Image (cartoon, rainbow, N blue to C red):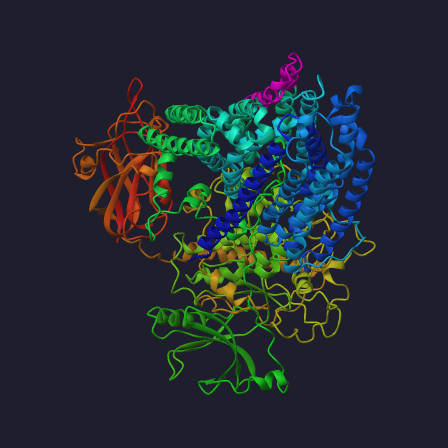
């Protein structure tokens, strides 16, 4: 199983743990509510008094602390646990201490103010004729109010456990509370029976203490049971009072809209509770009414299907939708939202209809026993009113998740104002005019449902502005078809329960309700299948539960719908769950997690001869009577990398043992011999190539150097502009000679650049991995130049333009193009920003030309840098504890690039240039008196403009020399109005290219310092050995002018006299025969597998007069039944497909070209989700060509209609007259 599959399974497991805990808790909660109804009834004043006293602390917690905890503290806790060196212990200790103190003080204040608080929830009970009941309510409220404190502690501990991937305890702990509560009411029943509520008398002190005290005890037990799990997770609490500087202020600012959202829903709940309190506070002393308890019990039943299905769907939807949002793919967010919405409503609409039709038998079975037999009908009426709003509530819930995926919490708050306002207005309008206490709860429930009809209407149009591809009418049609499929099942269920309700036996009524449910489900699926509702058809296939792996997932996966692309990090922390009396819950904005750090392997500094460490390796095996293996550093694909000792020259070397049976080894050896000719010191050297040796096989010997890869350096954060430009300039200059010889690196990345301990840059080669890699479709020089742009981008903002790679998050994408570095991180100099733009954009802003060669990159970055260098700062990053002026410090290396004539804007700082070897200073050279980062002009010198790459001082991850501040970079795009090209448009390849060199380098770097793979091929010019240091401005300018003249002359001569190196001929492309063709109309997608399959061969028979046609539909989108239909082509064997020529029967519509997402011996025919799109076209001409961005290796092709062309008024049909495939062998 791959890591991706394992990650998907982890989501299923985590979701199953949460869902099972929630389900058991909900069931026990229902049992508890049923027992309360049996003992105290549903509409009596006793049950009202108990429920007001018991639920107000929960409501206050959500209003005063819950929103803050879940939306402010939880993100900070997760961040601290993930990133702090101590696992977040110190931070969590501070948070627990501060929050417990604040919550304790708040609980004391609220408890003292209990009369005022309760009057805000149940004002009708303060009337003079309710004095005795008011006193009883206050007594129970005083006992229950400390629950506020324990709720806070419970959720705080639970979130600490969640942050440590312990999801089960928090979901299962409420079960302990329900068990205690059930035991308390069982004891009450044994002592006082179930007739006390019918006497019309308030609770006695003993009764009040038992019920209220037992309720508080349940919350305490619920909290205490988490403590052992906290210890088991390795967390021990120690009070800390140094709370200043925890960073909560900024987080609170970000989460303020969610806190306001929770507060708003809670305030409306207070209004509803006040209106409900009048149902039992008037009339005779034994008056019953449909008040707060009836409202809550109806809500408890109504929310159950939502809790079990929609919450799980939203949990699975958020990571995928968030990834699309971060990538700037709004259509992907819309598709994820629509998918979750259709699946949820497919089962929530029938559930809503069932709750409406079966409200009487359901509530009678649950709440119509004992004392509740007299007033259960109140709950039935309220449940019917709630059921009307189940579908809009579900749609609104998922729409809000789309906003959260886009990191937008302000809009949901503003939308909630409309919903809460509509709820409040409707509640007042429906509750006040009528004086019927038996229908108060039903009228308030109807107001709640109506408010969500208003809310979902407004939310849809607001969300549609951000997600234009979010369907509207298609969703309505889907709901109408579902309603039609549900009506026969509802009628059947109503008939069965109507007949069984005539019997007084509880067992018969329960059996009748069960039979009605089973029969209704079967009839619903039967009808839905006839109506071709794809979601129900898919579920039926999943429920068959065939043994073995038949290509289908199980029922849990069918509901959760985990995507194969989800990573473990996406699945690590499910959405926060909290008590949600209003049904909306408390939500944390979800942002995609940072990619995990790749394993970094350490190449330690070789031990000094004579030390115990050196003697310990003295017994290692000796190769060629010269290289003694000392320490194994990595194993990769049967090849081994060792640090070894050169017994002849007494130095450390790197030895790579190759697999002699691998047919690619001969190529590796040959490329390594070519690489051995490279003499440029910026490339690591191959010292020896051995074809074979008895007992060892072939092996390679390389130069050994210590340092850190750029990949590891960037883990600590972005570099300064000077450092970034200097590193890329050095690499580009080293590539000039390599490219001139017709050789290319092709694998430049943060993993193949080494920052040595002296601050120099080394380029690591790729010969080790060339045997297993597929060459890029780009030319060698274009691939290297593009990589230079990506490296510069990564150094500036610690983001990788091309996906989550090298331990870096993906660079943000807007309108299909990467955002400029200056828009990601403040302080990036415009000059450097423009170089990135000219490297990575197809049409650079400001009508600038593209940089197409390494020479272009070197020239531009040299103009930006002037004489400045960054080796001093880079050395400081790798040696934060070493004084650079210490005589024992490593020598300060410098660039080997002669800078051009400095412009006034780039001449404010100077560096000492030399050509000293890596490990020894230049003879006779002395360190500068003032470090280059601290150099200042002479007192009489005129002021000089700041360099365009100098940046504001910030807190780097590792100490570096301070750089003078530069003017703030503009926040807006420096070159507005230009189109952002995608990578596919610019380079002909996907937006997130892979890099097959990384796995080996990552493994090699997992142990810490550095790694030295094989260098690139030979041909790099040698470094000059006799250049003297330059110390004065005049000398620097003179040499710069001279160098510029020489460079221009050389370029002119080369351009006039040197012919272009020959490029290898592209493999021949020709039309290939299609072996087999079949229609693609899977049932899982809503199809019926019968789209004229017998006529499929007409599309490949060579006769354009014949055609395969789809069925005729009333809309271009297949009447909303399915995403599309097409033909699967089998080429007989794997080919490199270049393009597919398609001749249509009618112009118009939209077509996609897809290939299997995973290699297989047969074409995947279960769902279009098993295929990935490589080309598409809309508004089609009658003849078109579908060409992938780059040739694709595949045996199977899917030519897929997603929209049909019109053939008549209100008639649509597609047809392929001819399909031809061009490919190379």
x, y percent for residue 1198: 30, 41
Tell me which residue sits at (75%, 71%) in the image: 886
x, y percent for residue 400: 56, 33
Asked if 687 appears above or below 436 in the picture, the reply is below
Dominant SS type (magenta) = helix
- Toward the viewer: 75 or 964? 75
- Toward the viewer: 395 or 1171? 395
| Location of residue 485 by image quarter | top left
Relative to 541, 171 lies left or right: right
Image quadrant in which the N terminus is located: bottom left
Q: Is residue 1006 magenta?
A: no
Asked if 686 appears above or below 594 in the picture, the reply is below
Asked if 626 appears above or below 192 in the picture, the reply is below
Answer whether residue 1079 is visible to the viewer in this image. Answer: yes
x, y percent for residue 616: 58, 85
Image quadrant in which the C terminus is located: bottom left
Q: How many tags in the picture?
A: 0
Q: Residue furthest top?
A: 433
Relative to 1112, 352 lies left or right: right
Answer whether residue 329 is visible to the viewer in this image. Answer: no
Tell me which residue sits at (65%, 48%) in the image: 159
Stretch in magenta: 425-453
| Location of residue 544 by image quarter | top left
Relative to 680, 987 lies left or right: left
x, y percent for residue 898: 60, 60
- Toward the viewer: 831 or 396? 396
Asked if 736 appears above or below 846 in the picture, the reply is below
Relative to 1119, 453 lies left or right: right
């Amino acid at each position: 199983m791959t890591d991706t599959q394992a990650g998907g399974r982890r989501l299923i497991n985590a979701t199953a743990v949460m869902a099972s805990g929630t389900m058991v808790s909900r069931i026990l909660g229902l049992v508890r509510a049923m027992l309360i109804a049996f003992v105290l009834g549903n509409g009596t004043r006793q049950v009202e008094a108990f429920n007001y006293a018991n639920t107000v602390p929960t409501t206050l917690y959500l209003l005063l602390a819950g929103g803050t905890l879940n939306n402010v503290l939880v993100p900070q806790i997760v961040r601290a646990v993930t990133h702090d060196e101590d696992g977040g212990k110190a931070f969590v200790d501070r948070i627990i201490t501060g929050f417990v103190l604040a919550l304790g003080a708040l609980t004391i204040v609220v408890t003292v103010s209990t009369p005022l608080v309760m009057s805000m929830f149940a004002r009708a009970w303060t009337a003079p004729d309710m004095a005795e009941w008011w006193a009883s309510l206050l007594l129970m409220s005083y006992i229950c109010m400390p629950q506020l404190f324990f709720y806070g502690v419970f959720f705080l501990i639970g979130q600490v456990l969640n942050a440590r991937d312990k999801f089960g305890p928090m979901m299962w702990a409420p079960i302990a509370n329900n068990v205690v509560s059930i035991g308390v009411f069982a004891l009450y029943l044994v002592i006082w029976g179930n007739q006390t509520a019918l006497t019309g008398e308030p609770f006695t002190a003993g009764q009040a203490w038992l019920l209220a005290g037992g309720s508080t005890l349940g919350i305490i037990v619920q909290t205490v049971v988490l403590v052992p799990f906290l210890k088991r997770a390795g967390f021990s609490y120690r009070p800390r009072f140094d709370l200043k500087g925890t960073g909560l202020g900024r987080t609170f600012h970000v989460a303020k809209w969610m806190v306001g959202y929770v507060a708003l829903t809670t305030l409306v709940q207070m209004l509803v509770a006040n209106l409900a309190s009048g149902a039992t506070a008037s009339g005779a002393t034994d008056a019953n009414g449909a008040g707060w308890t009836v409202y809550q019990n109806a809500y408890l039943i109504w929310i159950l299907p939502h809790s079990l299905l929609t919450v799980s769907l939203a949990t699975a939807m958020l990571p995928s939708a968030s990834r699309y949002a971060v990538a700037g793919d709004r259509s992907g967010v819309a598709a994820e939202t629509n998918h979750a919405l259709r699946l949820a409503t497919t089962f929530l609409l029938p559930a809503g209809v069932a709750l409406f039709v079966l409200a009487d038998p359901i509530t009678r079975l649950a709440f119509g026993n004992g004392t509740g037999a007299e007033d259960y009908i109140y709950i039935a009426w309220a449940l019917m009113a709630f059921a009307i709003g189940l579908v809009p509530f579900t749609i609104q819930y998922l729409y809000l998740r789309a906003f959260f995926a886009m990191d937008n919490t302000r809009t949901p708050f503003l939308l909630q104002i409309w919903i809460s306002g509509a709820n409040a207005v409707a509640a007042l309008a429906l509750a006040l005019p009528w004086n019927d206490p038996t229908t108060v709860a039903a009228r308030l429930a109807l107001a709640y449902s109506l408010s969500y009809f208003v809310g979902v209407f407004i939310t849809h149009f607001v969300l549609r502005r951000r997600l234009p591809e979010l369907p509207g009418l298609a969703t309505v049609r889907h709901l109408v078809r579902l309603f039609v499929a549900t009506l026969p099942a509802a009628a059947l269920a109503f008939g069965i329960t109507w007949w069984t309700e005539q019997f007084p036996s509880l067992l018969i009524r329960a059996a009748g309700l069960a039979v009605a449910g089973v029969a209704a489900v079967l009839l619903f699926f039967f009808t839905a299948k006839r109506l071709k509702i794809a979601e129900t058809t898919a579920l039926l296939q999943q429920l068959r539960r065939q043994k073995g792996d038949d290509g289908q997932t199980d029922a849990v996966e069918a509901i959760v719908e985990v995507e194969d692309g989800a990573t473990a990090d996406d699945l690590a922390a499910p959405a926060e769950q909290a008590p949600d009396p209003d049904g909306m819950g408390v939500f944390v904005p979800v942002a995609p997690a940072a990619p995990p750090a790749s394993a970094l392997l350490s190449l330690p500094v070789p031990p000094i001869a004579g030390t115990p460490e050196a003697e310990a390796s003295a017994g290692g095996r000796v190769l060629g009577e010269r290289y003694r293996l000392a320490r194994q550093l990595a194993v990769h694909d049967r090849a081994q990398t060792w640090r070894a000792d050169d017994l002849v020259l007494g130095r450390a070397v790197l030895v790579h043992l190759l697999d002699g049976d691998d047919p690619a080894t001969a190529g590796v050896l040959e490329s390594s011999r070519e690489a051995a000719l490279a003499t440029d010191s910026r490339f690591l050297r191959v010292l020896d190539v051995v074809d074979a040796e008895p007992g060892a096989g072939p092996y390679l010997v390389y130069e050994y150097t210590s340092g850190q890869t750029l990949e590891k350096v960037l883990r600590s954060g972005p570099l300064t502009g000077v450092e970034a430009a200097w590193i890329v300039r050095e690499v580009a200059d080293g590539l000039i000679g390599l490219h001139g010889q017709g050789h290319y690196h092709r694998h430049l990345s943060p993993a193949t650049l080494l920052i040595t301990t002296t601050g120099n840059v080394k380029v690591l080669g790729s010969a080790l991995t060339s045997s297993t890699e597929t060459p890029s479709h780009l030319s060698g020089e274009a691939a290297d130049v593009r990589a230079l742009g990506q490296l510069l981008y990564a150094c500036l903002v610690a983001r990788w333009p091309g996906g989550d790679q090298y331990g870096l998050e993906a660079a943000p994408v807007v309108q299909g193009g990467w955002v400029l570095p200056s828009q990601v991180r403040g302080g990036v100099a415009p000059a450097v920003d423009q170089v990135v733009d000219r490297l990575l954009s197809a049409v650079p802003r400001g009508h600038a030309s593209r940089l197409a060669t390494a020479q272009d990159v070197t020239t531009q970055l040299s103009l930006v840098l002037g004489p400045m260098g960054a080796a001093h700062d880079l050395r400081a990053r790798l040696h934060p504890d070493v004084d650079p002026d210490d005589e024992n410090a490593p020598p300060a290396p410098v660039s080997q690039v002669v800078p051009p004539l400095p412009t006034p804007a780039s001449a404010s700082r100077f560096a000492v240039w030399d050509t000293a070897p890596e490990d020894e200073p230049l003879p006779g050279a002395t360190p500068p008196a003032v470090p280059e980062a601290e150099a200042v002009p002479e007192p009489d010198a005129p002021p000089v403009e700041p360099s365009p790459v100098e940046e504001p001082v910030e807190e780097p991850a590792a100490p570096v020399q301070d750089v003078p501040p530069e003017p703030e970079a503009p926040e807006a795009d420096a070159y507005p109005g230009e189109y952002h090209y995608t990578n596919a448009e610019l380079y002909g390849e996907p937006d997130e290219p892979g890099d097959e060199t990384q796995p080996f380098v990552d493994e090699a770097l997992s142990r810490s310092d550095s790694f030295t793979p094989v260098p690139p091929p030979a041909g790099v010019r040698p470094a000059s050995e006799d250049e003297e240091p330059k110390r004065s401005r005049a000398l620097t300018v003179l040499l710069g002018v001279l160098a510029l003249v020489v460079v221009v002359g050389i370029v002119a001569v080369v351009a006039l006299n040197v012919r272009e190196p020959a490029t290898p001929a592209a493999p021949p492309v020709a039309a290939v025969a299609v072996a087999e063709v079949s229609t693609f109309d899977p049932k899982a997608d809503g199809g019926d597998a019968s789209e004229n399959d017998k006529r499929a061969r007409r599309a490949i028979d060579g006769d354009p007069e014949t055609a395969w046609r789809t069925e005729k539909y009333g809309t271009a989108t297949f009447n909303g039944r399915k995403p599309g239909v097409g033909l699967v082509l089998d080429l007989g064997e794997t080919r490199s497909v270049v393009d597919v020529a398609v001749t249509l029967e009618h112009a118009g519509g939209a077509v996609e070209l897809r290939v299997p997402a995973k290699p297989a011996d047969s074409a995947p025919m279960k769902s279009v989700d098993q295929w990935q799109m490589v080309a598409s076209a809309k508004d089609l001409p009658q003849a078109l060509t579908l060409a992938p961005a780059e040739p694709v290796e595949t045996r199977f092709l899917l030519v897929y209609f997603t929209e049909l062309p019109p053939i008549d008024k209100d008639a649509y049909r597609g047809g392929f007259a001819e399909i031809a495939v061009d490919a190379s062998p």
